[in-house]
Every structure is written in structure tokens, then in C-alpha cells.
Amino acid sequence: MLKLEAPWYSFANKLKVLFERDSDISVGDVVKLDGGEAQYCLNIEVRNHEKFLALRALPSIKQFGNVKLAIVLYDEQNANAGSDAALYETIFKGNPILNDIKDVVDFTGARHVYVEFVPEVLQFFDDNLQDYNGNWSGIAEDIARDVFDNEVRGVHFCTADVKQAAKPAEKALG
């Protein structure tokens, strides 16, 4: 029997699949709230203070039509984060889905940060009408673009060329 889930559950699943291999970040389940600004809440526990600071790039409230999902980060300390490149380097530090982060300045002097993921399909269970089996398949670039709801100008999510993507062994040696 097909059971459809609301889009905020799909959003939580996207966050989970982005960080499921990262031992420093645990994404909880969506919880219904009784009152307040948001109707649902998603807790993210971060065991690395630098990653906590960097994950503040996530929106604190994600809007789905007239429903709001509050995203709550947990850590012991609070401080200011650094540059956009450093922010995403910290978020994805040690995460094997990241290929590289490039911080470049174009001919006009504008700074651009390219967060480049390995060319790999990520998949998770997601009840939706697009797939009868309930599987969501996509690449990290699309998931990150949706999850981070990037309002920061000059930050771009992309996927590495298959031929140029560094293999884990090459990264360790390089």
C-alpha cells in the first residue's frame, strides 16, 4: 500500500542521506510541535564544534507552503563562522561524498565558492508519487542545493566530472 509523506519528511531524508556517513552529525526525525512559529521540528546533533558553526548555513526555518519546519542545531558552544569556503569545508570535512571545494575570484572581482561532490547517486526511501517503490534517487549536488536553501550569493553546488573525480585513495595520498 502506497503511503504518501509530506515534503518536510522528504527534506529530512535528504539531510539524513547527505550526512549518514559522517560520524560527527546525526539528523533526527521530524517531530510535530504543539505551538510556536513552526508546526514541525527537525533536530540535528553535531559533535564537532567547527561543523556546528558551519551548519548554521542551513535555514533555521524551512517553509513548505503554509507549513514551517524548524531546524534546530545542538552543540555546546556558539561562535561566529568564517568565510563561505571555510564554512562548507567544515560542514563536509571527512564526508566521502565531497570531492573538492574551490574558492575562486572571477574577472569582475566577485568571489565564488564551488562545492563539488563525487559523481555518485544517493538513494533513500521516500514515499512519493514519482516512484512506486518509494525510492528517491539523486545526486548530492541537487540534495545540497535543496537542503541548504542557499541564499548566500556566490556559493555553487556541483558534481565532479567522472574522469576528474578523486578516488578516496588518491585523496589520502594527494
Image (spheres, helix red, strand yellow):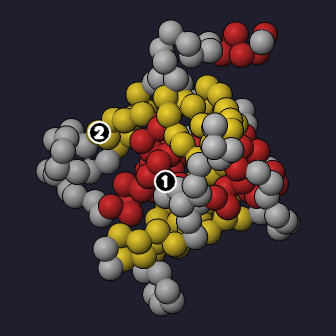
> Which residue corresponds to the image point at 48% horizontal and 90% vertical from the top-left?
35
Residue 166, position as x, y percentages in the image: 62, 15
Pair 1/2: label in front: 1
Q: Earlier in the sequence, mark 1 or mark 2?
A: 2
Question: Is 43 above or below relative to 164?
Answer: below
Q: Outermost residue, bottom direction?
A: 35
> Which residue corresponds to the image point at 62% horizontal and 69% vertical from the top-left?
72
Residue 146, position as x, y percentages in the image: 44, 52
Q: Marks 1 and 2, how far apart in space?
A: 18 Å
Q: Is residue 91 visible?
A: no
Left or right, residue 27 beside residue 123: right
Please report contact status of discs 1 and 2: CB closer than 8 Å, yes or no. no
The amino acid type, in three-letter code, at marker 2 is: Asn
Question: Where's the C terminus, which quadrant?
Answer: top right
Question: Is 12 above or below relative to 166?
Answer: below
The amino acid type, in three-letter code, at marker 1 is: Val
Q: Nearer the viewer, residue 84 or 97?
A: 84
Under circle 1, the secondary element is: helix
Question: Is 25 above or below relative to 68?
Answer: above
Under circle 2, the secondary element is: strand
> Which residue corresponds to the image point at 38% horizontal and 63% vertical from the top-left?
8
Q: Which residue is mark 2?
A: 135
Q: Nearer the viewer, residue 131 or 118?
A: 118
Q: Which residue is mark 1?
A: 147
Residue 162, position as x, y percentages in the image: 48, 14
Q: Tell me where residue 22 sits by quadrant.
A: top right
> Which residue corresponds to the image point at 80% horizontal and 54% vertical from the top-left?
82
